[in-house]
Amino acid sequence: MSSAEDARKRIEELRALINYHNYRYYVLDSPEISDAEYDQLMLELKHLEAHHPQLITPDSPTQRVGAAPLEAFGVVEHRLPLLSLGNVFSGDELFAWHRRVSNLAGEEGLDFVCEIKLDGLAVALTYENGSLVIGATRGDGYRGEDVTLNLRTIRSIPLSVPRNAPPRFEVRGEVYLSRAGFKRLNEQRAREGLSLFANPRNAAAGSLRQLDPRVTAQRPLDIYIYALGYAEGAAVPDTHWERLEYLRSIGFKVNPHNRLCRTIGEVQDYYREWAERRESLPYDADGVVVKVNSIEMQSRLGTVGHEPRWAIAYKFPATQGTTVLKQILVNVGRTGSLNPYAVLEPVSVGGVTIKQAALHNEEDIRRKDIRIGDTVIVQRAGEVIPEIVGPVVSKRTGNEQVFSMPSHCPVCGAEVIKPADEAMHRCPNSACPAQAFEKLKHFVSRGAMDIDGIGEKLCAALMETGLVNDIADLYYLSREQLAGLERMGDKSASNVIQSIERSKSRPVSRLIFALGIPHVGSETADLLASRFHSLDRLAQATEEELLSIPSIGPKIAQSIVAFFRQEGNQRIIRKLRQAGVRLAEEVPAEPTELPLAGLEFVLTGRLESFTRQEAEERIKALGGSVGSSVTRKTSYVVVGKEPGSKLDKAASLGIRQLTEQQFLEMLKGSQPA
Ligand code: JCF
C-alpha cells in the first residue's frame, strides 16, 4: 500500500474518532477521553492534512473555523418557511387553544410533545449526502441569512451525519448561549472596555451575525435541535416525538427535557414543573412549546400567517420589564458600606410590582452607564432583589443625570471613604446611627443571636425611643419599657424579654458572628470559636496568630484586630459580660489543638521583632510554655543577637536551636526545616 493510501486511511480513522469524541463532549456532555488526548488526535489529523492537502474535505473536523471574513451574508430561501409561534400566557388560554385544535381534529385523541422554549435564535441546517451544506437564520421566515461558516464553529452541530441519514434533509434548532457563557463573555468585554450585551439572546444573535467566523468561534454558542424540516430520499417517522428521537440517534443535540404528554392536563403539569424549575436550567428559557405530535395532523391543522395552528408557546411569567429610573438613593449598611439602589416608576414584572432595584456599587453603575432619568430594563429572578440590566439608550432625552456617590454619609454626615482595593464606598463612623440600626438587625437575626420577636420594626422603635443605642442595650431592657412601646402588649413584651434572656446562652460562635465584625461570616465565626473558645481570647489574638489559622487571610485578621481595638466595641463587650451573656465555651480549650501545645521554649539573646515579653505571650497564646533555663525538657532554644551561656548549654544537651527567622515561621504555623 502506498504511503498516500496509508495517510488516507488514517485520516478517515482520525476524523471518525474526533467526530465521535466531539459528539460525546458537545452533544452528550459526557466525554470519554481527556482534553489532552483529544488535542493529540486533532494535532495528528492537522499534521496529516498539511502533508496531504488534496485529502482535505469541508466536513473534516479541522475545517470548522478557517474561512476568511465575509463582506456580507448571502440570502437563503427557505424551502419550507420557518414559522414563529403564537403565545399563550395562562392555563385558560392553553385550554382555549386545545379546544380549537380538538374541534378541528375531530374525534381523534391527540397527544402532544412539550419542549423547553429557549430564548435564542432559530436556524435551519441543510445536509446533503451526509455533510452540512447550508446554515441559515430565520430572517423573515421565508428568506434568511447564510451564516453557514459561523454555524460550523458550533461544536454541537455535526458537520457530517451517518451514512444511513437521508440524502437531503433540513433540521431546525435554536442557537443559544448559556447563562455562564454569557457572563464570561460580558466579563471579558468589560475587561476589554467593550460595550456589554443586555442578555444571552442578544449576545447569541450578535455572535452568530459576525462576518468573521473566527470571532464566532470564540463565543460559547450551543444549539438544541427542535424539529425536522424536510427529508428526501429516505423514510422518516410520522410523529414529532419519534422524529426527535431519530434526530438524536443520528447525532443531533436534542433537549433531554422534552416530554410526550397524552392529555392537556399533562401539558399543564409540564408547564408548572418548569415554571418552577426554570432557574435550575443552565440557559434562559422563556416558556414551553406545545406541539401536536402527529405530523399528519399537523399538516391538516395548517398555519395561519406565520403561526402554525398545531403548536403554541406557553410563556413563563416575564422576568424583565422596562420602566423609568426616578432616583438613585443610598443605604448605609451594617459595616458602613454605602449601598446605592434605584427608585423606579412602579412596574409589573411577571405579576409582581417592582419599585426598587439593587445597584451594587458606583463602578457597576458606571460600567452599565445607568443614569438618573433613564428608561431601564429591570430583571427579577426568583426571590432575589430585582436588578437593573441596563439603560435603553435609544430612549434618552439628554436630560439624564450621571450619578456619583455622596461625599458625606447620608445618615450621619461623616466624610465618605473609598478604600482603593474595595468596590464599596464607606461611612467610617462606627457610631453612625445607620450602622447601629443595621448591626442591631443583624444581631437579633435568625443565624446570629436568633432573638425571637424582635424584627426590623421593633429594632427601629427601640432606637428611635433611645431605649437601645447599641446591641448590648438589649440586655438591659425591662418588660415595662417594652410594654410602653406602641403596639406592644404586656404579653408580647414578656415574650420578647424571654427571648432576649434565652439568647444569653447561645454558642460563642453565634456571638462572634452576631457582633458583625467586617468580613467575619458565620463560617469564619465557627472557625474562630473552635480555635479560641472565648471572646476574650479572640479579642487578645494578634494578627500573626490569626493568620496562622488556615483559611484566615490578612483582610479578616486585620479586621478582627481592628474591631477589638475600638473603644466602642470594648465597651459593648463589657456591657454584654455584665448582663450575663455567655462569652466563653464551657468546654475548656483542648491543649493539644494549639500548634505549640506541649512545647517548651527558652529564649536567649536579643530578638529584633519583639520584646521578650511579647515573645513569651505569643508562645503561650499558641499553647507553648516558656522556661527560664535550658534543661532536657526544653524543646527549642530561640537564639537572638548576643546570646548568653544558654546557647552553650543547649549545644551540649543537643537541644534544637531556632534562629529568630525560624521562630517567626513557627509562630505562623509552619515547622522549621
Ligand atoms: O426553543 C425554541 N425557541 C423553539 C422555537 C422551539 C420550537 O420547538 C419551535 C420554535 C419556533 C417554531 N417550533 C416552532 C415551530
Image (spheres, rainbow, N blue to C red):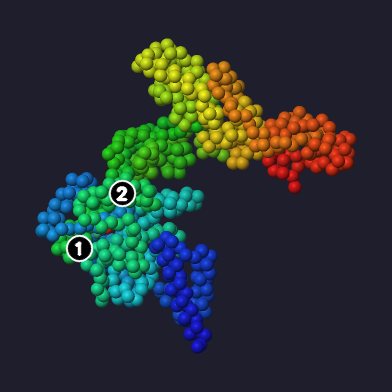
Is ligand 1 within 8 Å of the beta carbon of the residue shown at mark 1?
Answer: no
Q: Which residue appears at 87% of the width and 38% of the height?
A: 649
Q: Which residue is mark 2?
A: 274
Image quadrant in which you'd find residue 629: top right
Q: Is residue 166 above or below residue 4?
A: above
Say which element carries label 2: helix
Q: Which residue is mark 1?
A: 294
Q: Is residue 64 left or right of residue 556?
A: left
**Crowd around label 2: few <14 · some 14–19 · many ≥20 (10 Å):** some
Q: Which residue appears at 46% of the width and 13% of the height?
A: 478
**Crowd around label 1: few <14 · some 14–19 · many ≥20 (10 Å):** many
Q: Nearer the viewer, residue 273 or 52?
A: 273
Q: Amino acid at mark 2?
A: Trp
Residues at marks 1 and 2 touching, judged by CB atoms closer than 8 Å: no
Q: Which residue appears at 26% of the width and 55% of the height?
A: 114
Q: Quadrant of ligand 1?
A: bottom left
Is ligand 1 within 8 Å of the beta carbon of the residue shown at mark 2?
Answer: no
Expressed as whole percent of the image width and height from the top left, the position of residue 503 reads: 48, 24
Q: Is residue 73 above or below residue 185?
A: below
Q: Amino acid at mark 1?
A: Ser
Say which element carries label 1: loop
Expressed as whole percent of the image width and height from the top left, the position of residue 258 reads: 30, 57
Q: Nearer the viewer, residue 37 or 380?
A: 37
